Image (cartoon, coloured by chain):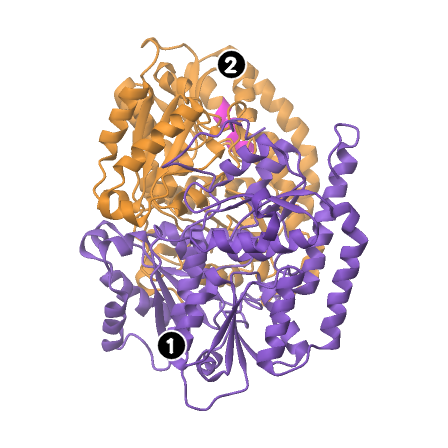
Chain colours: A orange, B purple
């Protein structure tokens, strides 16, 4: 297989290769990497906070490409789905953009009266010497709202480093409202971004168990809830790649322990409920969780049977942003009879890759930060029937004449929770069994 | 009601852009480079730029978009991006084997001052560029112009690098295409063939971004202007440049370098702009207008006649690129419609006189704004002041359409939530019929739906 020499240790075939899957490496220049930048990471994490302003300080592109980029829904305000930019021009690049930033912030705050504002610094802001912190501080004083600088120059690492920047920004909000008293049997839901309204399902499950929810960070997020997030008794963290850092910081500063969970697939979803009940050591919670799971799974299994029957023996390739999600996907696919033959992520870490390797079947190819040429070869070599990935992977799968399931930005269908599992099975079925592929010649 | 935060009262803004009607230069350079055969675009900047451009183009075309990135790090932002670019050139020729690497810069690499010519020369001196292969470039700082000027810069870069005047004039005509869809480029080629004019179209994204499903992923699909044709463009007897913003610079460069004279024309959108294109083809190609083309024109006129009573007086809001908006406004006037609001984030002071000319004696009935703060928020505020009957523009009109219940035809870049633009043109007489079909179709559907709610002006 043609793999860039320097990338050799970022690919592992289970059972064949001895080495560990290397990760956390900068992408090779010239590689058609599927990865994004620091700014992108910070933006996707923070933007679901629906009553805050998100002002992007830089040339127009960074604001244009991230305008309503994910289907993160809000049950209330929708300011987060608009695109705000200082649209820096050559003049500001030469003479500095602080004045523009200040004017833009004031214009924005006057217009929208938001609860708080995030100001994202893109690649060139640091280079042209803007003191964004000072501008934010001054306007904050003048207008009486929190303005939080998000230092996210694209070049300062990968998307994953952007998550860290976002977590740091969130820490500045947390603990700024209410008392320090912990609310018993309460949680923060961290790391769900309410794509296609998934968070509503989760909130519903936890409420049925009698768990109180303090803040959802950041899906359907609200500034005042996040300010009070320090009052939660427990943090529940999904999407470990982006938000474990926040949980660790909250643990250090506010002594709030955290559990890592996933809401994809029956096993992981149910475990996410049981773990909370177990943590609170509450029989009533556990009984309600058991009842809920019994009800949901009881409804679900007969419906899944049809899909499992049809899909058994199919093979899948997975290439997603975070490795934790990939692990859940392997399990969820197994539940509907689909074997994972290729699995990888853009930003997985060592621990996640270890788990990924452990639960994979012999012969599965594991990969970090792949590119279209490699991915095409892996998919062909392992004769995958479907690819699960994001925007940029979809047309590659289709060109190869195989199915595709979107597990990223663009989807409009909830895939989390029990309802999501059924949607997922239906999506996989619809693509894997589509009659269109009988008309296309696959060359493998 | 996603846009419920929009206020009717318009406050002067000096620094803030809300919901832009443009994006940055590099994506235009990437799109133009994809219209060259066996060409791999390369983004000299942070990884995110390339990722965003590829994602947006992928979402618009539903096709794989291949492009490399220099993957800048903290180090490159301090010491310059030379090492990254050299490594990238080497890696790309080794692994992806393109005939051409088309480099464009970004805000980052421009601000730190990387000299692409010097770095490319170093790559060449160090034998990183295989024999017969090419590395070309253009400068596209994101804080200048818009996606349209980025396209223009790359087209100019292509012409400057490749076109050669061998001293033997050919009978061919160059057509430099503005930023339109593969379907439009295909239509321009079809019309030229119909007229019997031998053209070199550059760039040409047909058969690249509308590639058929074959069961194979072609890293370089079969389309795109070939190097042979790019060189031969220097011998052509004339150039027709379609769209001032996207093609004028390239046409001038070609004239300066190879003495190929050019005529600047609009994109053939609508009746009169297509007339001018056809006349230019006939004139410079030395042919008569083909009967089949005349018939197409006749069919368009027939459709307009059938429809004119429905079209009269309808208020239209449009936004997008100047090269689209100018002929489109002219066409709407010819349809007896009223293009009342026009917004383009793309700067360029020619916009005002050009749009005024297109609107003719109705220009004073139109509110238009271009450049800074000419955005979709302003457009929405205008519409809130006084509504319109139809919206024409890119995907980002969907919020206004939904909130204000206004029929909406998607046209321009990007279109993320509809298909068809890759396959059915908006240029030429057929394209004009399509525009009419789309406008009337969505308006009537909407009238039907809202018949019992509130009367719409359709």
**Helix, strand or loop status at disc 1:** helix
Please state the horizontal and vertical placement of residue B129, each as a whole percent of the image: 31, 76
Q: Is residue A335 above or below residue B289?
A: above
Please state the horizontal and vertical placement of residue A35, each as a whole percent of the image: 39, 50
From where the camera sits, is residue A252 visible?
Answer: yes
Q: Is residue B421 above or below residue B428?
A: above
Residue B135 belongs to magenta span: no
Q: Name the chain under label 2.
A: A
User: Which label was assigned to residue B256?
Assistant: 1
**Helix, strand or loop status at disc 2:** helix
| Quadrant location, the C terminus of chain B | top right
Please state the horizontal and vertical placement of residue A105, each as a whole percent of the image: 35, 30
Tell which residue pokes out farthest to the left in this image: B79
Quick one: label 2, few (<14), some, or many (20+) residues within 10 Å? Answer: many
- Residue drawn at (76%, 27%) of the image: B453
Residues A438 and B151: in front is: B151
Residue wearing tag 2: A285
Please tell me how many numbered marks the rendered image carries: 2
Q: Name the chain under label 1.
A: B
Between marks 1 and 2, how big is the CA–CA gap? 79 Å
Of marks 1 and 2, the one in the foreground: 1
Please state the horizontal and vertical placement of residue A93, each as a whole percent of the image: 27, 47
Residues B50 and A441: in front is: B50
Boundaries of the magenta span: A265-273
């Amino acid at each position: 297989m043609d793999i860039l020499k320097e990338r050799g240790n970022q690919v592992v075939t289970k059972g064949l290769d001895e080495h560990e899957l290397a990760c956390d490496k900068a992408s090779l220049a010239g590689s058609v990497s599927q990865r994004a930048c620091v700014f992108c990471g910070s933006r996707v994490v923070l933007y679901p906070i629906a009553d805050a302003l998100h002002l992007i300080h830089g040339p127009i592109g960074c604001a244009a490409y991230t305008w309503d980029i994910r289907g993160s829904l809000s049950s209330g305000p929708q300011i987060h789905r608009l695109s705000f930019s200082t649209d820096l021009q050559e003049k500001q690049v030469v003479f500095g953009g602080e004045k523009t930033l200040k004017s833009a912030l004031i214009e924005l705050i006057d217009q929208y009266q938001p609860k708080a504002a995030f100001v994202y610094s893109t690649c060139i802001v640091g280079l042209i010497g803007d003191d964004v912190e000072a501008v934010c501080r001054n306007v904050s004083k003048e207008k009486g709202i929190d303005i939080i600088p998000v230092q996210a120059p694209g070049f300062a690492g990968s998307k994953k480093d952007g998550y860290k920047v976002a977590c740091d920004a969130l820490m500045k909000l947390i603990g700024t409202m209410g008392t320090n008293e912990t609310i018993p049997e309460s949680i923060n839901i961290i790391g769900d971004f309410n794509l296609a309204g998934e968070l509503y399902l989760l909130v519903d499950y936890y409420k049925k168990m009698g768990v109180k929810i303090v803040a959802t960070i950041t899906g359907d997020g609200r500034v005042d809830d996040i300010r009070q997030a320090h009052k939660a008794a427990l943090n529940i963290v999904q999407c470990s790649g982006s938000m474990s850092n926040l949980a660790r910081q909250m643990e250090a500063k506010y002594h709030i322990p955290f559990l890592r969970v996933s809401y994809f697939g029956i096993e992981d979803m149910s475990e996410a409920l049981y773990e909370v009940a177990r943590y609170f050591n509450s029989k009533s919670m556990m009984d309600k969780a058991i009842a809920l799971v019994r009800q949901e799974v009881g409804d679900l299994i007969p419906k899944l049977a049809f899909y499992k029957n049809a899909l058994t023996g199919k093979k899948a390739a997975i290439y997603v942003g975070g490795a934790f999600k990939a692990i859940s996907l392997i399990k969820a696919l197994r539940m509907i009879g689909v074997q994972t033959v290729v699995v990888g992520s853009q930003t997985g870490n060592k621990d996640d890759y270890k788990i990924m390797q452990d639960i994979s079947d012999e012969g599965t190819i594991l990969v970090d930060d792949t590119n279209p040429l490699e991915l095409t070869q892996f998919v062909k070599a392992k004769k995958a029937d479907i690819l699960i990935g994001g925007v940029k992977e979809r047309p590659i799968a289709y060109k190869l004449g195989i199915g595709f399931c979107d597990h990223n930005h663009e989807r409009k269908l909830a895939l989390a929770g029990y309802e999501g599992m059924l949607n997922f099975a239906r999506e996989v079925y619809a693509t894997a069994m589509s009659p269109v592929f009988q008309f296309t010649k696959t060359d493998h | 009601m996603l846009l419920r935060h929009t206020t009717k009262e318009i406050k002067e803004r000096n620094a803030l852009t809300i919901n832009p009607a443009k994006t940055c230069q590099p994506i235009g350079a990437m799109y133009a480079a994809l219209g060259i055969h066996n060409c791999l675009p390369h983004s000299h900047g942070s990884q995110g730029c390339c990722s965003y451009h590829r994602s947006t183009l992928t979402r618009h075309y539903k096709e794989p978009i291949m492009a490399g990135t220099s993957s800048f790090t903290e180090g490159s932002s301090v010491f310059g991006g030379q090492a990254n670019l050299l490594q990238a050139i080497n890696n790309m020729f080794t692994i992806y084997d393109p005939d051409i690497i088309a480099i464009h810069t970004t805000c980052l690499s421009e601000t730190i001052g990387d000299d692409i010519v010097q770095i490319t020369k170093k790559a060449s001196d160090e034998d990183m560029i295989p024999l017969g292969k090419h590395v070309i470039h253009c400068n596209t700082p994101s804080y200048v112009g818009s996606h349209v000027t980025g396209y223009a810069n790359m087209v100019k870069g292509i012409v400057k690098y490749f076109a050669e005047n061998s001293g033997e004039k050919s009978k061919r005509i160059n057509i430099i295409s503005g930023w339109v869809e593969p379907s439009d480029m295909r239509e321009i080629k079809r019309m030229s063939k119909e007229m019997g004019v031998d053209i070199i179209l550059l760039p040409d994204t047909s058969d690249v971004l509308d590639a058929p499903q074959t069961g194979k992923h072609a890293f370089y699909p079969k389309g795109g202007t070939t190097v042979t044709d790019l060189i031969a463009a220097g011998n052509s007897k004339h150039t027709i440049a379609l769209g001032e913003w996207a093609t004028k610079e390239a046409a001038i460069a070609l004239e300066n370098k190879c003495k190929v004279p050019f005529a600047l024309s609009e994109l053939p959108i609508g009746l009169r702009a297509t007339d001018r294109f056809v006349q230019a083809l006939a004139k410079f190609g030395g042919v008569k207008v083909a009967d089949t083309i005349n018939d197409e024109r006749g069919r368009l006129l027939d459709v307009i006649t059938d429809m004119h009573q429905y079209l009269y007086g309808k208020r239209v809001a449009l936004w997008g690129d100047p090269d689209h908006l100018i002929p489109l406004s002219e066409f709407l006037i010819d349809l007896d419609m009223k293009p009342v609001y026009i917004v383009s984030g793309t700067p360029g002071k020619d916009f005002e006189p050009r749009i005024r000319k297109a609107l003719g004696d109705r220009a004073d009935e139109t509110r238009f704004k271009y450049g800074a703060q000419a955005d979709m928020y302003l457009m929405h505020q205008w519409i809130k002041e006084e509504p319109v009957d139809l919206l024409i523009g890119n995907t980002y009109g969907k919020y206004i359409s939904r909130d204000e219940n206004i029929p909406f035809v998607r046209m321009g870049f990007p279109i993320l939530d509809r298909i068809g633009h890759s396959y059915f043109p908006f240029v030429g007489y057929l394209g004009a019929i399509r525009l009419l079909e789309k406008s009337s179709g969505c308006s009537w559907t909407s009238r039907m739906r809202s018949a019992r709610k509130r009367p719409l002006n359709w």
